[in-house]
């Protein structure tokens, strides 16, 4: 299946839900992998300095749009029950929706700014650090601001927490984008050779 086929089949609700399920699973798996990193990679209880789920989130949102965002939001809600256990379901929902939509809008902005089409066929390697920076920057500042506003974080920690989450997201996004870029180029090259 070519990346363009995703958009050809996007009228099928079952296919859209499958994209959301894939996004959900990718986020959960990346989160579980990240949670096994040594404590030296943690800034604070739930803020990692290498956060792989940020990369899977960005890739799924780039590829699947709002359906990737939906899968990510559900996964993030589920994970929030683990890393924010003493909070209410409403706070988990606010956090997960804010985080997912911040990334969605950051990606929409970045893809327009770099004229990257929805099939990602014109994505170039030099754009990866900029996509990572834009995605992690917008997500970090907005998510931490919302967390301060709903009293999940102290306002005195806004800047340090924002920069910590931006650092973790940047590294996680960049690692995931490099791996995705290398793998997708290899898969596309293999398909060109075979077919």
Image (cartoon, rainbow, N blue to C red):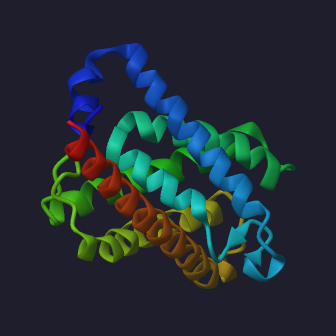
- Picture residue at 41% right of the left edge, 68% below the top: 178
**Residue furthest front as drawn:** 194
Instruction: Indicate the quadrant where residue 192 lies.
Output: top left
| Picture quadrant where residue 164 is located | bottom right
User: Residue 174, how many percent across, how many down?
Assistant: 44, 71
The quadrant the C terminus occupies is top left
Q: Does the rendering let one see residue 70?
A: yes
Question: Front-most of 24 and 154?
Answer: 24
User: Is 158 placed left or right of 139 in the picture?
Assistant: right
Visible residue check, residue 65: no
Q: Which residue lies furthest to the right in this view?
A: 86
Foreground residue among 25 and 97: 25
Q: Is residue 194 left or right of residue 35?
A: left
In which quarter of the view is residue 52 placed? bottom right
Q: Which residue is drawn at 62% across and 73% down?
A: 50
Across and down, in percent, residue 161 comes to 63, 78
- Residue 102 lies, in percent from the top left, at 43, 55
Q: In this view, does 134 lie above or below 72?
A: below
Say whether residue 16 is left or right of residue 144: left
Residue at 60% across / 36% down in the picture? 74
Determine whether, in the image, residue 168 is placed left or right of residue 70: right
Q: Position of residue 172 (x, y in %)?
A: 54, 68
**Residue at 58 percent of width and 57 percent of height:** 53
Name the residue at the left extreme.
115
Quadrant in which the N terminus is drawn: top left
Q: Tally the marks.
A: 0
């Amino acid at each position: 299946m070519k990346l363009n086929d995703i958009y050809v089949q996007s009228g099928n609700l079952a296919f859209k839900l499958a994209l959301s399920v894939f996004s959900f699973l990718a986020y959960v798996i990346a989160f579980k992998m990240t949670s096994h990193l040594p404590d030296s990679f943690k800034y604070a209880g739930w803020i990692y300095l290498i956060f792989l789920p940020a990369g899977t989130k960005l890739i799924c949102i780039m590829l699947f749009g709002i359906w990737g965002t939906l899968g990510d939001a559900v996964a993030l809600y589920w994970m929030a029950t683990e890393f924010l256990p003493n909070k209410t379901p409403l706070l988990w929902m606010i956090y997960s929706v804010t985080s997912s939509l911040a990334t969605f809008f950051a990606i929409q902005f970045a893809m327009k700014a770099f004229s990257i089409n929805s099939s990602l066929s014109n994505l170039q390697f030099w754009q990866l650090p900029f996509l990572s920076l834009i995605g992690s920057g917008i997500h970090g500042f907005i998510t931490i601001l919302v967390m301060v506003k709903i009293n999940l974080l102290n306002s005195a920690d806004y800047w340090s927490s924002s920069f910590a989450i931006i650092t973790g997201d940047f590294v996680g996004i960049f690692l995931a984008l490099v791996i995705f870029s290398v793998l997708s180029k290899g898969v596309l090259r293999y398909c060109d050779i075979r077919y």
